[in-house]
Amino acid sequence: MSRAGYTTVSLDPPSLSSTLGRREELLLCLLSITILLAPSGVLAADPPAPMPVPKHFHRAVAFDGKIFVFGGGTGRRFPVLDVESQRWSERESPFTQRPALVTAVAGETLYVLDPFTPALRSYDPEKDEWNTLARPPRKRANTSLAAFKGRLYLVGSYLGVAAEHSVEIYDPKSNSWSTGPPLPGIEKEDHFHLTAVLGDRLHVVGHYFGGKSHWVFDGKTWESRADAPVACGWKSDGLEAVRDGLLLFKPAAPTPGENAERPDEIFHYDAKKDRWRSLGSLPKGYPVIFGATARLNDQVYVLGGHPDPTAVFRYDVTSRAWERSGDGKPES
């Protein structure tokens, strides 16, 4: 017998009563109530639940068995999914849930950045408490935030004139910002980079204007890796680190400069071989733009976006199976 995240083992003492004494039988009776074997992580068994509010142009992050969704709306409340129970709740934030907020988890702390203000805050989900941190050096738009080696990295930006290739680093220990080595190869209108941390490397893939570039950072220098198989950027696409590689979720909505006839597809990057390969098509109804992804253990959640801003898709990395909120099994 099992339930989400646990396996229940039951022992049947009556079948052993003929060979055991009364004392041993009593001990087995106590054990037979239930033994819960703790799993390596929380995995959901039920179909994903739809979001309680519509979301476009938002970000999502997994933390402590929950998925937090920031931005992409109005007001100050944000939705939180308890993965094991598949139940949504809403919490209050000190800032408006405007589009393009970015978020990351470093250590045991969740961070949310409003790049337009700019303002950085930390959040303690257990205490439901927010703290205002050191202000970033300057405003940014369409930037990416990644937690890498205990620090936060702001990568890229676009403010309507030219792209920013600078990298700014926040150190939680000193509550201060510094400047890191700039991202190579940036051209005008390069922004919306996809970021993911795999092992001891920060990966930065693609950009808004037809970008396939793939760079890795070890904390000191940048190095190039195999280009992505298609143009990509976080306005419409998702990148998640899983096991020994990366998953790139690329819907059919074309990045500017790209052929619009390309199909929906999911790709895997093998870090050891430095090679990309296709894992097949995305399911029907997958958001073509403004969705968000978040990984928890071996499951990747895809939330909101167009055309269904409350839909939730779930991808199992091991079985490569998709589920969708509502009917449970989306058409492939």
Image: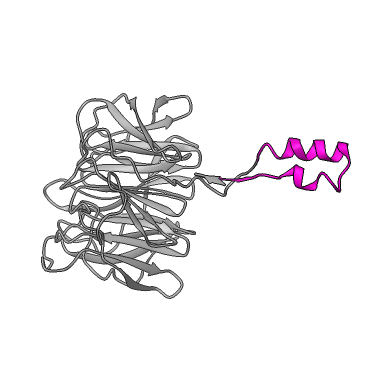
How many tags in the picture?
0
Q: Position of residue 41 (x, y in %)?
A: 53, 47
Question: Can I make out residue 181 in this image?
Answer: no
Q: Residue at 22% x, 59% y: name it.
A: 207
Q: Position of residue 104 (x, y in %)?
A: 38, 43
Say which of 196 and 141 sits in front: 196
- Residue 83 colored magenta? no
- In the rendered view, tell whether residue 332 sits above or below residue 98: below
Would you identify the image quadrant in which residue 331 lies?
A: bottom left
Say which of 159 and 106 sits in front: 106
Q: Residue furthest front?
A: 18
What colouring does the structure picture have? one colour
324 left or right of 1 in image: left
- Stretch in magenta: 5-34
Question: Can I make out residue 195 in this image?
Answer: yes
- Residue 16 colored magenta? yes
Say which of 65 and 179 sits in front: 65
Quadrant that contains the C terminus: bottom left
98 left or right of 202 in image: left
Q: Position of residue 44 (x, y in %)?
A: 44, 46
Q: Residue at 70% x, 40% y: name it.
A: 32
307 left or right of 51 in image: left
Q: Residue at 27% x, 44% y: name it.
A: 326
Q: Position of residue 62 (x, y in %)?
A: 41, 43
143 left or right of 48 in image: left
Would you identify the image quadrant in which residue 316 lies?
A: bottom left
